Image: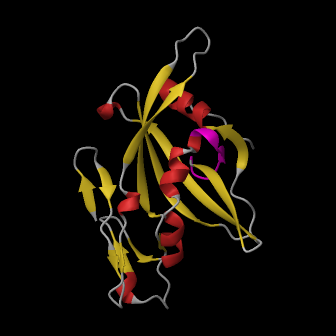
Amino acid sequence: MGVNWRTGLMRWKPHTGKDGTQYPLNHLHPFRYDVVLAAKGGLPEKTINVHVGFGMHCFTKKVEPEDCPHDSYADDRETRTFDRLRYELSRALRMVARTLPERACAFAKNENFVTVDVSTESGLTHRYGVFFNMKRWPAQGTNAVLVTIQSAYGLDPAKPSPERGKIRFNVLLGHVMRGTRPVAPR
């Protein structure tokens, strides 16, 4: 684990497998991009600086008794197991985060939001749930928002969808900037 001292976001150290295979995690280093919110209600358009960070749950899973101890991965809060499938799926996360303004978003549990990336491979449909939260980040400027991708994993088709209601990302940005909370459907 490491820290990007300029922004305070995690820069994850690579994982080394038992066989010596290296799994670099630099694709999950923090980054930023701008989103322009259109003029609305007499207010001018506004450029929002979106800072994106990634949590450890994007490439690890909870520890199971059968897990190889060599695959342990820890930060200062918890120890989990490096998950090769989550790792491979995580390669798409930068693109998912950059395209949030064009994606369908929804409410999820625990004040999080979710977007589901759907892909088809060999005739099979795969659903990848990307769970995130958002908050203002005044330390980075008056128009800065921190988006933290908390977790991301392949969704089990036998389980119900984590999506509750729909909400556009730019609407979420507007709420964050106003200091209001969107109302989740019941």
Residue 184, visible in the rendered structure: no
Q: Is residue 186 above or below residue 73?
A: above
Q: Horizontal placement of 155 versus 158: left or right?
A: left
Image quadrant where residue 55 sits:
bottom left
Q: Horizontal placement of 173 versus 74: left or right?
A: right
Q: Residue at (65%, 46%) from the top-left corner?
A: 107
Residue 45, visible in the rendered structure: yes
Residue 73 locus on image (x, y percent)? 36, 75
Q: Residue at (73%, 74%) from the top-left corner?
A: 122
Q: Nearer the viewer, residue 183 or 130?
A: 130
Image quadrant where residue 116 sits:
bottom right
User: Which quadrant, please, contains the C terminus?
Assistant: top right
Q: State the residue lying farthest toward the top.
A: 42
Q: Nearer the viewer, residue 105 or 101?
A: 101
Q: Residue at (51%, 71%) from the top-left corner?
A: 88
Residue 63 locus on image (x, y percent)? 46, 80
Q: Horizontal placement of 86 versus 171: left or right?
A: left
User: Number of callouts in the render?
Assistant: 0
What segment is highlighted magenta in the picture?
A: 101-111
Residue 126 locus on image (x, y percent)? 69, 67
Image quadrant where residue 155 sits:
bottom right
Residue 48 among magenta residues? no
